Amino acid sequence: MRSKRLIARSILAIVVSLSLNSRPAFTQDQHIYRVRVVEAPLFERNAIALPGRGEAQIPEQWLEISADNDPSGMSGPYIVRNVSQAMLLPFLPDPKKATGAAMIIAPGGGTLQLSMDWEGYQIARWLNEHGVAAFVLKYRTVPTPGDVEVYRKIIETMAGGNPPPPEAIPSEIAAREELATTEDGMNAVKLIRSNAARWGIDPMRVGMMGFSGGAYTSLRGALNAPLESRPNLVAAIYGALPGGATVTAATPPVFIAAASDDRQVPSIQATGIYDAWRRANASAELHIFQNGGHGFDTRSQGKGTDQWLAIYANWLARNGFIRETSTKR
């Protein structure tokens, strides 16, 4: 049972979404992905190594993935896979704007890859505009086949509403990955707090936010980490509640955002997070938008999810992380 749960988590609850969605699954020929190998951005050289390191059986690889129709949110620039060394990349605000708060950002990608630009760098720059020091977490991922064409077929299979081949994510690898990503998140919090004076950060205002698989990692940190490595608040953007989670009144506040038409992680997962927090009398705020799909990140689409950053800014202000509640994107 545990192995099945771990595998399901690694593919972002795709099987669950199919069971809840009465519409037929897309066919693979409707989701043609184009994959190109690229170099990591130069500023990644400023990233700081965290203690977490896995077995580097396959070299880390940076990709640009595009698709005409991408319901899985697996496309984008600066996608990284086969991460075996956890890293933390600081984005510090203008000192004149700095509020003293910090936010760790965990990008999504089904634990197979990380969307470093759209769910990392872009949100980091937005936080900097609001005076928050941002830290993009490149956490460890499940090893995937080195051949780019083989990997392209895996993500096309997932976009079609199907799990990847069993050999792509063996249960024992999924189990190690879940523990590793949680460890990476906790180590990130500890590193920031230990360097709080250096970066001008209040150690009691360190938050963590995640997208999709990164939301799962962020929630596990809020729920399971000891006090010294637990964030002071957490945000879950189109994420799911970790299995066996225990929420108490002392659990950090949570902000939750999702879209009603998300086929990969249905919005019922978002309500599950909210219900767990409220049953424990812990602080929670939930927003489910009419449309926006999965992977809406920071881009404007002319859909309901375009509002989420302005709403999130208001929540951060009410929790003492930013000074103003501008709707500037």
Image: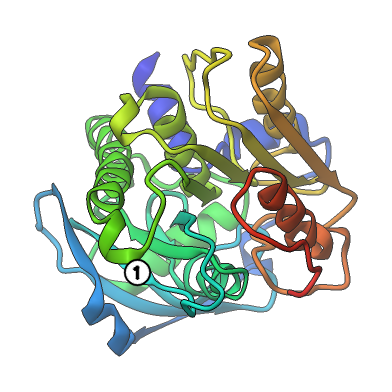
Q: Is mark 1 on a helix, strand or loop?
A: strand
Quadrant containing the C terminus is: bottom right
The residue shown at (32%, 77%) is 62
Place of residue 168 in the rendered image (x, y in percent of width and height, measured from the top left): 32, 47
From where the camera sits, is residue 108 visible?
no
Q: Quadrant of residue 272 in the image? A: top right
Q: Is residue 36 above or below residue 322?
A: below
Front residue (pair 152, 269):
269
Q: In this view, does 204 lie to the left or right of 76?
A: left
Front residue (pair 250, 244):
250
The amino acid type of the residue labelled 1 equals: Pro
Query: Which residue is under mark 1?
Result: 90
Front residue (pair 36, 316):
316
The residue shown at (65%, 27%) is 273
Judging from the image, the colouring scheme is rainbow
Q: In this view, does 149 lie above or below 243?
A: below
Neighbour class for label 1 at 10 Å: few (<14), some, many (≥20)?
A: many
Quadrant containing the N terminus is: top left
From where the camera sits, is residue 156 visible?
yes
The residue shown at (75%, 30%) is 20
Q: Is residue 107 left or right of residue 265?
A: left
Place of residue 271 in the rendered image (x, y in percent of width and height, measured from the top left): 74, 28
Place of residue 241 in the rendered image (x, y in percent of width and height, measured from the top left): 56, 28
Q: In this view, does 151 lie to the left or right of 21?
A: left
Place of residue 305 in the rendered image (x, y in percent of width and height, measured from the top left): 81, 59
The residue shown at (23%, 37%) is 173
| Total residue callouts | 1
